[in-house]
Amino acid sequence: MDLGVNITGAYHSSFGKLEGETLYSLYEKAAKGAIKDAQIETKAIDGVFVGNYSGGAFNQQENIASYGVNVLPALRHKPMYRTETACSSGSSAIHMGIMAIKSGMMKRVLVVGIEKMTDLDMSGVTKALSLATFWPDEGSQSVTAPCMFADLAKGWMKKYNYSEEKLRPWLAQISAKAYSNGAENPLAQLQKPKSADDILALPDEKNPIINAPLRLHDCSLVSDGASALVLEEASVSKGKGLAIKSFYSASDYLDSFGKHKSDHFLEGASFAVKKALKDANFSIEDIDIAEVHDCFTITELLLYSAMGIAPAGREFEAIESGKVFPDGDLPVNLSGGLKAKGHPIGATGVSMHAYLYKQLVQEAWGHQAKNAQTALVVNIGGSGTSNAVSVLGR
């Protein structure tokens, strides 16, 4: 089944600390880059959807969507919207764009994901990110993302009786996979491979505990970057591009793991994956390649069970079997993921879609997957509060 909406163009900046770039310049380059890649005239765009987590906290700029008029004056008086669902803001913008096309109100839309995070020092970044928690009980009490995902790791270890010593090598293998894959991606923030043994051998000062059991090499990056897509109604694109087979976004409780939702299984992500696959008339065995949300290594590990590629409590089997590595049955995060590619929050979801689009049309940025026909995006916002999933196919 197809939704009748195709991706027909994409843009992806380098991710990292982008000196000289601003939120505005990133927006401009992404918008113009995707339109150029789609080989269309700007005036053909019916609306713009912008994923941006917090231009206000990071750049003192809310109300960023309408800057699209400054960038592309031909779009003056056309609708422009910003979406915000924490780390899944970009995927939410894509999903809103799909719904606009499916409603019949638009034929062709531009989706832009942007974030400029590195203008702040680490304390400023931490404060900005804490706004994605349930503020009264969490952010205001210095609860941050590492705290929440460390609680997820602790809950999983307790549920299945694993020690930190048992967990660490599995997490190191996920980090090592990300670094190796990132080294093949010319747009990635980190392009230096490290083995799992290299990571495990690091002294504490080189791999400090951020929030036990999570260490520095278990955490994704603070990044600047932008990505963009052009989406078209299939009748307009006439077979050009890549079909969006299905999508779903499952919302869950705003507060952290272990209060109203599981502290050992990613329930919202699991629901969204099952729903999106069912709507596409697919099973997980039909998926050839995936980009998933590795904000922390424990997140990717537990997504293996949420996706259905390993049993809950034995997620490590997906690593030990080689299934999720580049030559495995379902390569996960060939881009390097958030861990190595980078994680400019509002751009992340759009980046995942753009990367997979280029993979499936055989124009990969870096390592090209062999004969990939179908792809899965799993993008999580907050502590599993917004779970955005898309199924793509040639």
Image: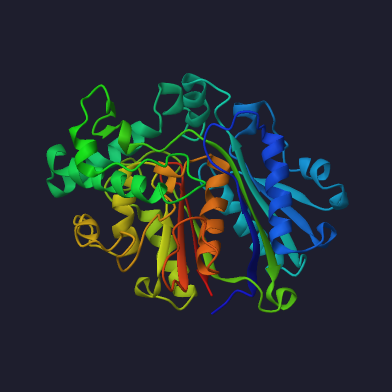
Q: Is residue 72 above or below residue 214?
A: below
84 displayed left or right of 108: left
**Near-viewer residue (339 or 279):** 339
What colour scheme was applied to this rendering of the protein?
rainbow
**Where the N terminus falls, by quadrant?**
bottom right
In the image, residue 183 lies at what x, y percent?
40, 47
Residue under the point 51% across and 68% down: 360
Residue under the point 58% across and 40% down: 225
199 displayed left or right of 376: left
Total numbered circles? 0
**Near-viewer residue (204 or 280):** 204
**Where the C terminus falls, by quadrant?**
bottom right
233 displayed left or right of 75: left
**Near-viewer residue (208 or 180):** 180
Q: Quadrant of residue 105?
A: bottom right
Residue under the point 72% across and 78% down: 235
In the image, residue 36 lies at what x, y percent?
73, 57
Q: Is residue 296 above or below residue 241?
A: above
In the image, residue 260 lies at what x, y percent?
36, 44
Q: Is residue 182 above or below residue 132?
A: below
40 displayed left or right of 388: right
